[in-house]
């Protein structure tokens, strides 16, 4: 960038004097130098930390695995070199991390030993202290550790966090409560006023999958919650655990103002519906836009039959090509002579039905 | 006052205001990126991304990998894409009429057979010659599409048409992905509350000189050659500072074509990639955003600051020049297509800040700098330069550039720290010193060549793409588009 | 009796390794799919335990490849993926047992014993 002769203009020259610019350059150079020093310093600190971590990781890992696989060794004293290590907070955190990571993969004796070791080393205190930290990511970490390590006595404190205004804290707290109390822990759904993100929903579902099913207390209430994400989540629960008793409430959700809820309601009903569900879905179809129309056609194969033939034939002629193809699949899959209808259609109007027919036929053969 | 004094004043003020504004922007970008990166790093520390890969409720994804004459590495590349584990995934490799034996190689390596497949041309594209799937159940996620050559945008559109899942992830077939790249890229879609996430993008880094084995990154090395090394610094600056800051404002206009995810329905609604522009990746994002703005729907374009994807940077001046030339043309074309948004308050931040920023400091920058240089030479010839002012200004600008680069490097070391050796950082700093004298002028010149090419080729471009749309046995369905609009164009509810 | 374990988390790998070593098995450890494939061919283990999500080759691919051998080696798949469709997919490819995480080491050893003893009979 260049600057031109400013003889012509006094105002400019008065304000932008070379000396100002040179001084600014010097400031920039000084700042640059500071940053460069800071960069190398950070590099050094990080390297040191990393080296320390590496140097203890192996011996800690060896020791931890040795302890947790043996039924009797938890009672054994901690070797001196390891005890020394435990004075360092980095080492303590490293052990917590390793235990937490390993805990979620194992059941039975290994899992029990992990918790015993966690107690024995007093790491539960470390985790508890984190709950009172002002930084939310530290709070989250604490809740996470207590959750995995089955520290149920922290329920009172953690339960408060399930409706925390901080999204991440909320998520960890809900997860922990579920880890401790399984399906009963879902009671936070009664009161939660913040949205439960999709990611959190699938995290909770995954946790529940690992636990024995003990039933839901208020599934019908959740399905009529004013919090849309609670409704969505309840629908997923109803789908996954085939809760046919909430069939009526799920049907109501087909009228829900939120599209995401309606989409999930279709999926749920395809799982828990009765003989009338297919008709209900085809009725809802006309009020929906593309997303849920395609969704309905994708779910129909699970429940459709000859009664839906007329509806499907109409869809074969109307609308978007994706919908035509989806309708053709249901027709071939669920109705008597569906494939024959498609074949006839493909001779009748080869574009686009010939390719649709061949596609469906090939897919059925695979 | 003399007439020439008026002109000189004008130039002086214009340049001063221009560089002053740019400088303020850089400072703001730098400051903004700090907070955003910090927030992300804290949040990220123990997220279990694997959850996304294993959950049956995770969104379904179609990966689109266009390939043109990639025969040399296609088997390896597809193999590494196939090793991405995700429950609800299909991998669509689009052979864009390669002249080599890519398709034959794929057929043999993956046991492919041609299947009957109904292709809906809801986005008009060149004809699909065939759709292939594997006989081997291990490769059941693989779909290979063979089509008539039509360029990258056209190939991606074919992918969009064929994709059966809800989200599309576009990827350059020769990119090297980090282990969790796909999961990180998808997570923002599941975390929105209120606003719809329409697209996500990640950080692209330079893979030159890195150790790569079977499509996986074994060891990160600083590029040994000058140009790739310079680009490594440039990418750190652009991604860690620029995009991070813009994403915090939700003002991101570009998601790298090398690796990005989009909401499929919306991508179709807005008509898919525009094959008339060479900047199709940017253009699609701008069009999607514009669509959402016009319907007044709350939305977001998310950005993941983690290095997700590693790509080979041009190592020669010739190829680098061509790339930058194309980027400039792409920017001109994209901004030209959406000039309606320029300082248009209807488009909010997009119209008032993002677009103007791109217009002045990305699109016009090579021109302004080049004209400045021309003016300088002319005036030096007529001995009109006041050297004291000139040198002080030069020093000011150059040292500020160094400061900005040093800050970017500091942020990099503080956060992702990909180059761990002291000597690497030293080398990057030294490279930064040369930038204003070697790399930057070259990039500016390539941009100017982009202007020239743009001006010359303006008419011939349109013709070329027209040809592509007919003359195939497969009818390009245009009437269908009307139907599509009927169903699709209703506003989204929220 | 040689058992190959492919698992990308070092701590989990080590835990399984130690448990099985204690039961008298010889253990070969791998942290990625590529290494596993090479070691399966060169070291000829009697039983294979694989995680599904591995770098380079997924566990399912290893199952597919191993089951195409002239003398297929028994394979146990261990994965965090618990849903039926994935279990079925693994079984269809020829996996002999599917264990979903979190799992009990005792259950794993029981499966190993069952698979290795029945394998011995037809020979």
Image (cartoon, rainbow, N blue to C red):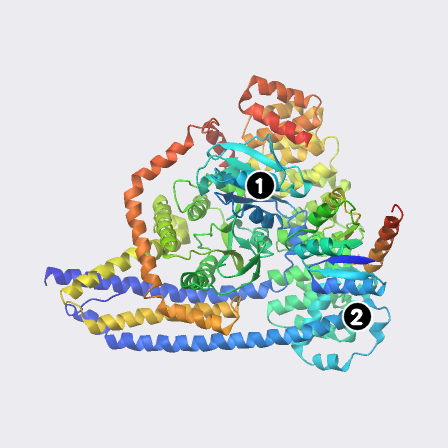
Front residue of A1 and A362: A362
| Element under disc 1 | helix
The quadrant of the image that shows the C terminus of chain B is top right
Q: Residues within 10 Å of mark 2 (few under 14, many from 20)?
A: some
Q: Disc 1 to disc 2, how far (Cα)?
A: 48 Å
Residues tagged by mark 1 and mark 2 found on one chain of the structure: no
Residue drawn at point x = 46 percent, y = 69 percent:
B409
Asked whether residue B210 appears in the rendered view, the answer is: yes
The quadrant of the image that shows the N terminus of chain B is bottom left
The percent position of residue B53, horizontal first and vertical second, equals 65, 51
The percent position of residue B314, horizontal first and vertical second, equals 42, 55
Q: Are marks 1 and 2 in contact (CB under 8 Å)?
A: no
Question: Chain ID for label 1?
Answer: B
Task: Tell me the quarter of the picture where residue B356 sits.
Answer: bottom left
Front residue of B432 and B462: B432
Question: Chain ID for label 2?
Answer: A
| Element under disc 2 | helix
Q: Residues within 10 Å of mark 1 (few under 14, many from 20)?
A: many
Asked whether residue B404 appears in the rendered view, the answer is: no
Judged from this view, the residue extending furthest toward the right is: C121
Residue at numbered disc 2 = A66
Task: Tell me the quarter of the picture where residue B60 sits.
Answer: top right
User: In front: mark 1 or mark 2?
Assistant: 1
Judged from this view, the residue extending furthest toward the front is: C42
Residue at numbered disc 1 = B106
Rendered view: A3 above or below B261: below
């Amino acid at each position: 960038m260049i600057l031109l002769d400013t003889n012509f203009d006094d105002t400019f020259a008065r304000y932008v004097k070379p000396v100002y610019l040179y001084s600014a350059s010097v400031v920039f150079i000084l700042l640059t130098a500071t940053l460069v020093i800071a960069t190398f310093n950070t590099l050094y600190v990080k390297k040191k930390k990393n080296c320390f971590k590496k140097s203890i990781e192996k011996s800690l890992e060896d020791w931890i695995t040795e302890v947790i696989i043996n039924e009797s060794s938890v009672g054994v004293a901690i070797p001196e070199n390891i005890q020394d290590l435990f004075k360092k907070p980095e080492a303590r955190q490293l052990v917590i991390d390793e235990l937490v990571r390993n805990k979620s993969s194992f059941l039975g004796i290994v899992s029990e030993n992990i918790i015993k070791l966690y107690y024995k080393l007093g790491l539960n205190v470390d985790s508890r202290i984190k709950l009172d930290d002002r930084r939310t990511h530290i709070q989250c970490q604490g809740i996470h550790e207590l959750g995995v390590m089955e520290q149920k006595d922290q329920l009172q404190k953690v339960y408060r966090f399930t409706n925390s205004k901080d999204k991440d804290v909320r998520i960890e707290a809900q997860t922990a409560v579920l880890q401790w109390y399984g399906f009963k822990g879902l009671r936070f759904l009664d009161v939660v006023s913040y949205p439960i993100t999709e990611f959190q929903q699938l995290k909770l579902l995954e946790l529940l999958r690992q636990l024995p099913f003990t039933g839901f207390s208020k599934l019908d209430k959740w399905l009529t919650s004013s919090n849309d994400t609670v409704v969505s989540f309840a629908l997923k629960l109803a789908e996954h655990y085939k809760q046919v008793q909430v069939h009526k409430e799920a049907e109501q959700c087909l009228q829900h103002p939120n599209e995401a809820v309606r989409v999930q309601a279709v999926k749920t009903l395809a799982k828990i519906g009765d003989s009338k569900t297919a008709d209900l879905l085809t009725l809802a179809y006309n009020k929906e836009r593309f997303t849920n129309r395609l969704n309905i056609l994708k779910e129909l194969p699970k429940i459709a039959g000859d009664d839906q033939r007329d509806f499907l034939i109409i869809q074969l002629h109307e609308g978007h090509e994706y919908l035509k193809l989806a309708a053709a699949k249901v027709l071939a899959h669920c109705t008597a002579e569906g494939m024959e209808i498609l074949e006839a259609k493909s001779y009748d109007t080869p574009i686009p039905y010939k390719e649709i027919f061949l596609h469906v036929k090939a897919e059925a053969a695979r | 006052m003399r007439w020439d004094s008026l002109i000189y004043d004008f130039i002086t003020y214009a340049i001063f205001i221009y560089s002053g504004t740019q400088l303020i922007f850089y400072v703001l970008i730098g400051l903004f990126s700090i907070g955003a990166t910090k927030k992300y790093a804290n949040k990220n520390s123990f997220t279990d991304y694997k959850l996304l890969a294993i959950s049956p409720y995770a969104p379904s994804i179609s990966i689109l990998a266009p390939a043109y004459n990639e025969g040399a590495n296609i088997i390896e590349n597809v193999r590494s894409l196939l090793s991405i584990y995700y429950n609800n995934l299909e991998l669509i490799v689009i052979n864009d009429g390669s002249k080599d034996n890519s398709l034959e190689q794929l057929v043999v390596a993956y046991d492919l057979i041609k299947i009957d497949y109904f292709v809906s041309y809801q986005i008009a594209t060149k004809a699909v010659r065939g759709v292939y799937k594997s006989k081997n159940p291990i490769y059941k996620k693989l779909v290979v599409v063979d089509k008539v050559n039509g360029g990258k945008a056209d190939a991606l559109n074919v992918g969009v048409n064929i994709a059966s899942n809800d989200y599309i992830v576009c990827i350059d077939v020769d990119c090297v992905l980090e282990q969790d790249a796909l999961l990180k890229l998808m997570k923002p879609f599941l975390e929105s509350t209120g606003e719809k996430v329409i697209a996500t993008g990640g950080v692209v880094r330079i893979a030159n000189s890195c150790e790569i084995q079977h499509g996986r990154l074994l060891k990160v090395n600083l590029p040994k050659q000058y140009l790739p090394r310079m680009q490594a610094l440039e990418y750190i600056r652009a991604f860690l500072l620029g995009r991070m800051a813009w994403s915090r404002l939700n003002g991101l206009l570009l998601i790298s074509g090398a690796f990005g995810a989009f909401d499929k329905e919306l991508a179709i609604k807005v008509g898919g990639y525009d094959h008339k522009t060479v900047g199709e990746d940017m253009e699609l994002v701008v069009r999607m955003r514009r669509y959402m703005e016009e319907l007044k729907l709350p939305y977001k374009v998310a950005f993941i600051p983690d290095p997700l994807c590693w790509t080979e940077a041009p190592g020669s001046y010739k190829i680098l020049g061509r790339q930058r030339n194309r980027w400039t043309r792409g920017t001109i074309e994209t901004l030209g297509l959406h000039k309606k948004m320029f300082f248009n308050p209807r488009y909010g931040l997009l119209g008032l800040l993002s677009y103007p920023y791109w217009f002045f400091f990305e699109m016009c920058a090579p021109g302004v700098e080049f004209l400045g240089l021309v003016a300088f030479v002319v005036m030096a010839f007529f001995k009109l330069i006041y050297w004291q002012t000139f040198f002080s200004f030069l020093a000011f600008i150059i040292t500020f550039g160094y400061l900005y680069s040093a800050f970017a490097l500091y942020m990099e070391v503080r956060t992702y720290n990909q180059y761990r050796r002291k000597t690497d950082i030293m080398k990057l700093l030294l490279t930064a010193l040369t930038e204003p004298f070697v790399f930057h002028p070259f990039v500016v010149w390539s941009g100017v060549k982009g202007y020239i090419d743009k001006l010359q080729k303006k008419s011939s471009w349109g013709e070329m793409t027209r040809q592509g749309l007919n003359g195939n046995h497969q009818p390009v369905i245009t009437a269908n588009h009307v139907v599509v609009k009927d169903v699709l164009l209703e506003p989204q509810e929220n | 009796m040689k058992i190959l374990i492919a698992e990308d988390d070092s701590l989990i790998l080590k835990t399984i390794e130690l448990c099985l070593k204690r039961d008298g098995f010889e253990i070969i450890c791998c942290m990625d799919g590529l290494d596993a494939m090479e070691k399966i061919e060169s070291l000829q283990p009697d039983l294979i335990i694989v995680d599904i999500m591995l770098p380079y080759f997924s566990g399912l691919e290893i199952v597919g490849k191993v089951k195409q051998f002239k003398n297929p080696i028994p394979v146990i798949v261990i994965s965090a993926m618990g849903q039926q469709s994935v279990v079925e997919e693994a079984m269809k490819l020829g996996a002999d047992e599917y264990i979903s995480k979190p799992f009990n080491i005792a259950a794993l050893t029981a499966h190993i014993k069952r698979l290795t003893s029945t394998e011995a009979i037809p020979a």
